[in-house]
Amino acid sequence: MKKLRVPHRTKSARVVQELVRLAAGLAASGSRVEDAFWENCLTAKIHAQLRTGDDQNLESALDQLYDTDPGGYSEFMYAIEAAIECSIFTRGNHTYDVLMLAVPMLTWSRFSIPSGLIAESVLSELRGQLQVQVLADDAQLALADCLFSPDQLPRGYHLTHELARKLWSTAVTGQRDLHMNPRQLPETGRFLSDTRYLLGGIAVPQGKPMFRWQQGTAGEHKGSNVSALQFSKEQILHAWQTHGTAVLLPLFQGCAFELLMPDGFFSAWRAADRLARPYSVRATVDFLETTLGISPDRLRAVIAPFYDQWLEEYRIGFTLKDRDSVLYGIIWGLVGDEDENTDSVAQIEAALRECGVTQTILLQEHFLLEYCEECGGPLFPNVNGEIVHAEFPEEGEVAPIHLH
């Protein structure tokens, strides 16, 4: 997952070096008790930075560690994420473990993919299904009443933490919904395939499980004699997809969509980033197949690597086998720790084969990240090794279809 960038104030070299020192100490730790020492010191420093409302020192320390200490970089990134999405929350005489929850949904449509405010009745049903199918018995859940596109997620560490605190407070106080002002959210870009997120806050009495898959003994289930094996993640995901999909059907009219596993904000985000790539391949092939009235084996995919300072993404241009013009293009971005040594091409080709596209061409050149000067959209490779604008047939050339 790429780091989020927001406007910064002047950084403090002293703070940056202290953050780097603590992260390096944690990465070099040789025992669990030493881990705890470094983690506590680092967490306190991170929280101090989050309270300033400025991400500059955190970003600068990450950049320095990325160049000099990969182990420290990983530990520091994990520590930042943990400080943002989870905490201990005290209200009165009660102490809670709290977590920022994300529920990702992969979706595609020839029409507009929904985002923005969710009707109270739909939100109530979603909350009920999450409580029953996903969360542990003692979990209190509050949901933001908005379906977020990637463009509408909070930008930067301290803004994400602010939203997390609002969700935790809503959950702990027994409220069910956190109202979002749609006028304060950025506009959503229009794509054939995209991701949507439902965000929430979970609160449980300290030390209690949050998710159903954590409930490890039959005695932890209210009046239940079933074993923990019946609450595996796979079974929970299947139940959530079955019941959650039924609730969301009215919201996603004219769209195909797939629910992913609800989880902590950053874990769910990373999973969605990875799974969105093969999903977009399937969506594109389905779109071309149904819109043009052709079978997938008539398509050809041209794959090319694109670089900035290093490999950033692969772009895939779809053509008909007997034509050179690019009908449509998609981006397979690198996520997490993927780089030139990751066999991303094999993943792309496997996703294409699963959709019935068997002819692929891999261009070996290193292409620069190029975009159309007029519309700003990305350019895609064709069979001749040229980077061109995708040109879909005019409406009169397209056979009418119904989206199922």
Image: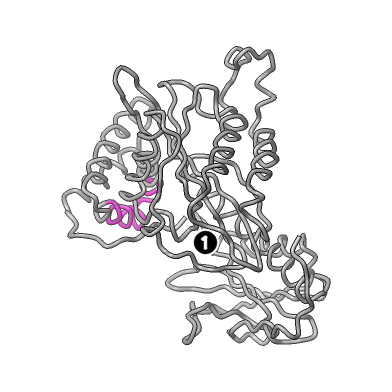
Question: Quarter of the image holding residue 185?
Answer: bottom left
Which is nearer the eye, 215 or 175? Answer: 175
Is residue 59 within the magenta segment?
A: yes
User: Is residue 50 shown left or right of residue 237?
Assistant: left
For label 1, the crowd category at 10 Å Cα-Cα, with few meaning under 14, some 14 to 19 and many 20 or more, is some
The secondary element bearing badge 1 is classed as loop
The residue under label 1 is 339
Q: How is the image coloured?
A: one colour
Which is nearer the eye, 297 or 99? Answer: 99
Asked whether residue 320 is in view, the answer is yes
Residue 330, x across and y down, in percent: 61, 70
Which is nearer the eye, 139 or 115? Answer: 115
User: Is residue 64 shown left or right of residue 302?
Assistant: left
Q: What residue span does the magenta drawing correspond to?
A: 58-73
Is residue 62 within the magenta segment?
A: yes
Asked whether residue 27 is in view, the answer is no
Residue 278, x across and y down, in percent: 66, 59
Residue 35, x across and y down, in percent: 35, 31
Q: What kind of residue is marked 1?
A: Asp
Give the vertical position of 46 relative to 67 (above or below): above
Question: Quarter of the image holding residue 114?
Answer: bottom right
Q: Residue at x 47, y 80 (%)?
A: 376
Q: Residue at x 49, y 26 (%)?
A: 139
The image quadrant where one finds the C terminus is: bottom right
Q: Residue at x 35, y 40 (%)?
A: 166
